[in-house]
Image (cartoon, rainbow, N blue to C red):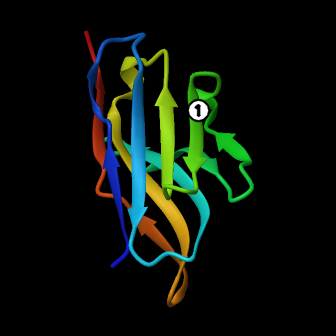
Amino acid sequence: QVQLVESGGGLVQPGGSLRLSCAASGLIFRLNSMGWYRQVPGNQRELVAVIDSGGTTDYADSVKGRFTISRDNTKNTVYLQMNSLKPEDTAVYYCNANLLVVTGSREYWGQGTQVTVSS
């Protein structure tokens, strides 16, 4: 069974840093695009950052210059380094991945990890 497991969320003060990790497990033939989304209660889930299989990245304007997405294909893992965090970054962060599995290319979501930026 393929699943995504996130870790690294928590409480941090404004200006601080956190690193999120998302590991894919199960029978996976290839990692296609991987990304991070976030959601605040009452709002739609929004894209934060994405990285494709070739390493090309894209970011939401609100996090450019502060967040960095990366991946380690040997570990089936994607990371989100978050620096200079602001209170408005507070949200549940979800990992998303398009993976080539037995039944073809499919999209998966992690369970979410809470990030709270507060003094």
Instruction: Report whether 116 appears left or right of 105.
Output: left
Q: Residue 63 versus residue 44: which sits nearer the camera?
A: 63
Spot occupied by residue 95 in the image (x, y as percentages of width and height): 43, 53
Spot occupied by residue 105 in the image (x, y as percentages of width and height): 57, 80
Taking the image as drawn, is residue 36 in sight?
yes
For residue 108, above or below residue 12: below
Q: Name the residue located 64 percent from the left edge and 39 percent from the top edge.
A: 59
For residue 17, above or below residue 4: above
- Please state the total of marks drawn on the protein image: 1
Quarter occupied by the C terminus: top left
Q: Name the residue located 51 percent from the left edge and 62 percent from the top edge.
A: 97
Q: Name the residue located 30 percent from the left edge and 35 percent from the top edge.
A: 9
Quarter occupied by the N terminus: bottom left
From the image, tell me which residue sits under label 1.
Answer: 68
Which class describes the residues within 10 Å of circle 1: few (<14), some (14-19), or many (20+)? many
For residue 28, above or below residue 72: below
Which image quadrant for residue 21? Answer: top left
Q: Name the residue located 51 percent from the left edge and 49 percent from the top edge.
A: 78
Taking the image as drawn, is residue 44 in sight?
no
Q: Amino acid at mark 1?
A: Thr
**Which residue of the protein is positioned furthest toward the front in this rendering?**
74
Spot occupied by residue 53 in the image (x, y as percentages of width and height): 69, 59
**Which residue of the protein is positioned furthest toward the bottom in this rendering?**
103
Instruction: Report whether 58 appears left or right of 9.
Output: right
Q: Residue 39 versus residue 36: which sits nearer the camera?
A: 36
As helix, strand or loop, the secondary structure at mark 1 comes to strand
Instruction: Report whether 90 appears left or right of 81.
Output: left
